[in-house]
Image (spheres, grey):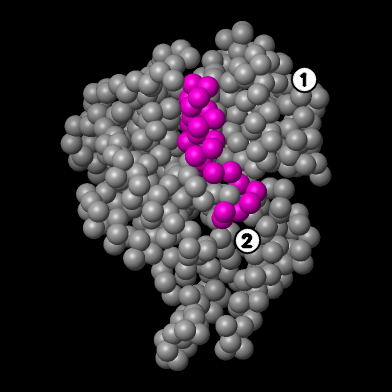
Amino acid sequence: MATTSVVLQACSKNSRQTKSSDGSAVTDNSPFEQMTLRENPNNGDKVSLLGFGMMRLPVEAGGTARENPDSPIDQQAVNDMIDYALEHGVNYFDTSPAYCQGLSERSTGIALSRHPRKDYFIATKLSNFSPETWSEKESKAMFERSLVELKTDYVDYLLLHGIGMSGGGKDAMNAFYGRYMDNGILDWLVEQKKAGRIRNLGFSYHGDIKVFDMLLRWHDEGKYHWDFVQIELNYLDWEYANEINPRNTDAVYLYAELEKRNIPAVIMEPLLGGRLAKQPAAITRKLSERDSRFTPAAWAFRFAGTPKGVLSVLSGMTYLEHLQENVRTYSPLEPLDDSEWTFLLNLARDIYELKAIPCTACNYCMPCPYGLNIPGIFSHYNKCIAEGTMPSAASNENEYQRQRRAFLVGYDRSVPKLRQADHCIGCNHCLSHCPQRIDIPHEMQKINRFVESLKQQIV
């Protein structure tokens, strides 16, 4: 495969002030930077290695639409962040009709349309997950609405959203055919590409590897041409995705299959839902001892950006400081050398052995029909694992009692009692919605048994 070229672009710097994660004002005084760009071998697009994922946009009440679904998006904050991103060389913006309670495309369109269309690339998706949107009419209407919301007459990068996921009571393969083949929509999208309304056609992958392999086989046969593919890639999922969850596929396989076909890869979940940015103290110490210049998040972003076939690495950023750190990491990228790559893969083994639940808090499983706060339950459980505060009978009695009380009190504070794991009835409604293919009812039963054992002072 021809090596994907790396191009450096000088980016202007203007001081900008916007909200931080605690609501206070943040002024950027960062030095002159150069964003690493990757060249799309299909058409020569110079794409920023950092891609802006528009799925966690800030809302006026603080936080994101997931945390405060009734609060309007803070459009001024979005405008400011996109202005900063463009000024610092970020030109790839990834959205979907499904993000931010369905309002991400509109907010993204408002912010981007204030700039020349040639200065940025828009990526959006045909997110026809619900069977009500599988018809030819509804799927076409979804695409047309995306153009209206994004205030554009063409999409630079259009994805079939979440292939490999089951849905509508069907397994992954039948769901794929229902969403894109039986209704003729994939052929229609190819026609839209020929007409110039789509510049690059690809898909994002979650779940059943048979669907992924089938689409690449179609590419080999010339049945359909994929201009790019979006995959989950980080140093934990590189070799441990399948071991963590048998329904997932190791990134080393996914990336290799794309690389040998010279299909550019767009990367999602470089931080695994933030998990790799908030490591246990022992893991953080190893990272710092190796090279204290890089935060845990920067280490993860360097890993995701190092493979030459990666076109862009997406980050769902809510606050300016997140954007600033990620811009610095890729301005320019300092690729991992072989020893650093091996170091992170060895570290992944240590993290894997912690046996945390691979939830990325994407909220696709929500709402639970029985009111459970599924991401909140998993988050508290994983937080205690990451911080090394899980109650263990191996601890001395005083330490065990301290950790036991902290876990139970923290659980009640994090998740209201009526939304905790003991209310799961195993209806399986959530299973088809989880991109990580987590056996959620099984994990709920496991956590509930653990909580009950703590209440009875046994482990």
> Is 383 in the magenta?
no
Write the residue at 54% across / 35% down: 254
Residue 347 appears at what percent x and percent y? 38, 55
Residue matched to label 1:
184
Outermost residue on the left side: it is 31
From this viewpoint, is residue 101 visible? no
Report, in whole angstroms, how far the alpha carbon at label 2 lies from the one at label 1. 36 Å
Check residue 374 in the rendering and tell me which mark sits there, or answer none: 2
The answer to the question of whether label 2 and label 1 lie on touching residues, with beta carbons closer than 8 A, is no
The extreme top residue here reads: 195
Q: Is residue 249 magenta?
A: yes
Magenta span of residues: 243-269
Say what amino acid the circle numbered 2 marks.
Answer: Ile
Quarter of the image containing the C terminus?
Answer: bottom right
The structure residue drawn at horizontal position 65% and vertical position 74%, both measured from the top left corner, is 448
Which badge, 2 or 1, comes first in the chain's sequence?
Answer: 1
- In the picture provided, is 306 more to the left or to the right than 32? right
Q: Secondary structure at mark 2?
A: helix
- Which residue is located at x 60 percent, y 29 percent? 203
Q: Is residue 5 left or right of residue 292?
A: right
Classify 10 Å Cα crowding around label 1: few (below 14), some (14-19), many (20 and above): some
| Image quarter in which the N terminus is found | top left
Is 45 positioned to the left or the right of 167 in the image? left
Residue at figure coordinates x 71%, y 54% from the top left: 430
Q: Which mark is residue 145?
A: none
| Along the line of sight, the residue nearer the viewer: 117 or 458 | 458
Q: Is residue 164 above or below residue 112?
A: below
Residue lying furthest bottom: 397
